[in-house]
Amino acid sequence: MTRLVDRLGRTGFAALSSLIWALPMAAWAGSADLSPIDKTAYPWIALGIGLVMLAVWLVLLTRLGKVPITKRQRRFDLQQMSGAEKRWTLATATFATGLIAWLNGAATVDWGPLIAAVGAGKVGPTLLAVALAVFAVAMVAGMWLSWRKESAAYAARVLSIYAERDA
């Protein structure tokens, strides 16, 4: 764990390790949507696992400050990041969250009625389908663009640090 924290930095490790509780919570949300319909999903089990893993993650975070790390530039260390990096990282996370929300919704919806209505040429459902497609494309494009901008801001930070050292 020490080596992983040293490699990612405290912020990066905290973000990556949050998956231990975020994934069970997403499973709970999806199974809670499906459970009343097919009676095969057990949402309370996923919720229980998610809450236990949230407690484990919080304990892990309390111990994170005691892990020694070497002094060097890290991409996702909030204390080292420039304002532009923080803004573009937040934008990337926002677009990624929007895409994940869209995918979660798409996975738990019966698309049959919408497909049938679009096939029948109804205007409202067709506009809804177009809006859903545009939203998905916008999330992917926003994620890609903001990641490129964040990467450029990180490269500028690293270059300016090396330029200061060499001067």
Image: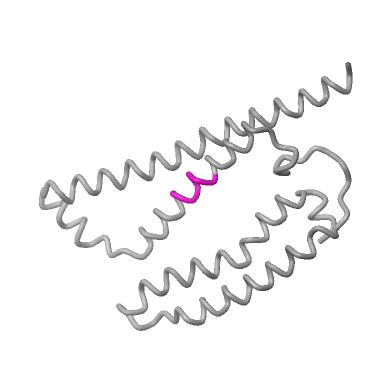
Q: Is residue 17 above or below residue 50?
A: above
Q: Which residue lies at the image location 40% right of the left edge and 74% below the top edge?
A: 32
Query: The C terminus is located in which quarter?
Result: top right
Please state the horizontal and vertical placement of residue 134, each as a whole percent of the image.
32, 41
Q: Which residue lies at the image location 73% right of the left edge and 63% below the top edge?
A: 61
Question: Is residue 54 shown left or right of residue 36?
Answer: right
> Magenta stretch: residue 139 in it?
no
Q: Which residue lies at the image location 35% right of the left edge and 83% below the top edge?
A: 39
Please state the horizontal and vertical placement of residue 49, each as a whole percent of the image.
58, 77
Q: Nearer the viewer, residue 58 or 151?
A: 58
Please state the horizontal and vertical placement of residue 36, each as a whole percent of the image.
32, 79
Where does the magenta region start and end?
93-98
Answer with the quarter of the image where residue 56 lies. Answer: bottom right
> Magenta stretch: residue 96 in it?
yes
Q: Nearer the viewer, residue 51 or 20?
A: 51
Q: Nearer the viewer, residue 156 or 148?
A: 156
Name the chief secondary structure element in magenta.
helix
Q: Which residue lies at the image location 50% right of the left edge and 40% below the top edge?
A: 143
